[in-house]
Amino acid sequence: MHDLISELAKLVSEQICFRWEYGSDLSDINIRTRHLSFSHDIFGKQLGIETVACDPQRFDASYEAKHLRTLICVGGEIPYGGISVDNDVAHSLLSAFNRLRVLSLSWCTRLVELPKTIGLLKHLRYLDLSGTPFRRLPDTIRKLVNLCDLEISDTEKLKEMPLHVGRLTKLQNLSDYVLGERSGSSIKELEKLHCLRKQGIRNLQNVKDPQDALKANLKGKTQLKYLVLEWNGDTNDSSNERAVLEQLQPHTSVEYLLITGYGGTRFPDWVGVSSFSNIETLGLRGCKYCCSLPPVGQLRFLRVLTIEAFEELVSVGPEFYGNCTSKEKPFRSLEV
């Protein structure tokens, strides 16, 4: 029955949805096609098929899909290979498909620069650039005013964010906001992003003025559920890092919180306070200068707790359990 339903779904979606696999005939793509993906089937590597060479003519037939809504190009740095897109191909694709709602160029490692024509995609809702080798993103990204999801995880070469990210006021997921060595103050751009549900901030050691962190207004983002705060783990100014973290206090709606590489000697008072009762997952990693732990035992719904690489921590005192009464056991929801 499962196979029959699968075949029926393929028949109904024929021409509207097209998945290119090794050996597929691109001539089946036409003006009715709305969703298009390029990737190998899962057995590609086992059959000795390597990543598809980047040949612009290979994509010619796809340009028939003038009303395309979804374009997924899975890159080659994944277990089973994929399609390889370079700068020229990317420019052609983005220029041809200006009605896209969903675009994924994840792990396209030959794509060293995102074309400025990305700004033409006025209707784009989802953009996945994870695993790409970009050092910077074009400023034209600020024109994607309908963008809800920007995924840029595993982009280790990315040095900083483009100008005016704060104009993307519909963003709900911003996996990484990267702060440059000379642009730490740009964290203020986050102030205008009121719809964020998932937020990561990378290279917080570049924030020199804690008031800039305050202006990011994480405390005012009532829909924020997932938050990652990341420093590089090296600092010669522990007091500043503590002051910055103090000002990055999020709204109590947060359910997932990860703090990594923090260089303060202790945590601000808000970390572990009982009002953050919605937190279910908490990670504290690489905080090598911290000599004490926050009172996380009083987080009622905390299920998963990770504490790693606290080099200065000698012992764990009763403060770790918080102000739990005799009737309230600490870590009441923790999974062992």
Image: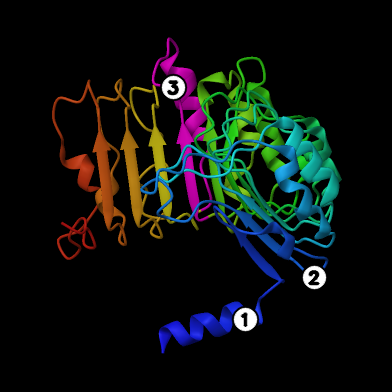
User: What residue would you read off at disc 2?
Assistant: 32
Name the image quarter holding residue 284: top left
| Side of 297 where 247 appears, left or right | right
| Side of 50 where 111 appears, left or right | right
Name the image quarter holding residue 332: bottom left
In reply to whether residue 248 is colored magenta, the answer given is: yes
Q: Which marked residue is nearer to the observer: mark 3 or mark 2?
A: 2
Q: Position of residue 24 (x, y in %)?
A: 60, 58
Q: Nearer the viewer, residue 155 or 194?
A: 155
Q: Position of residue 119 (x, y in %)?
A: 83, 41
Marks 1/3: CA–CA distance:
51 Å
Q: Residues within 10 Å of mark 1 (few under 14, many from 20)?
A: few
In reply to whether residue 9 is colored magenta, the answer given is: no
Q: Position of residue 277 (x, y in %)?
A: 38, 59
Q: Is residue 317 above or below residue 256?
A: above
Which mark identifies residue 11? 1
The answer to the question of whether label 1 and label 3 lie on touching residues, with beta carbons closer than 8 A, is no
Type of amino acid at the residue the image marks with label 3: Asn
The answer to the question of whether label 1 and label 2 lie on touching residues, with beta carbons closer than 8 A, is no
The answer to whether one can see residue 279 in this image is yes
- Residues in magenta, as a range: 225-251
- For the point 65% across and 59% down, which residue is it? 25
| Side of 329 where 85 appears, left or right | right
Which circle's residue, 1 or 3, is located before the other in the chain?
1
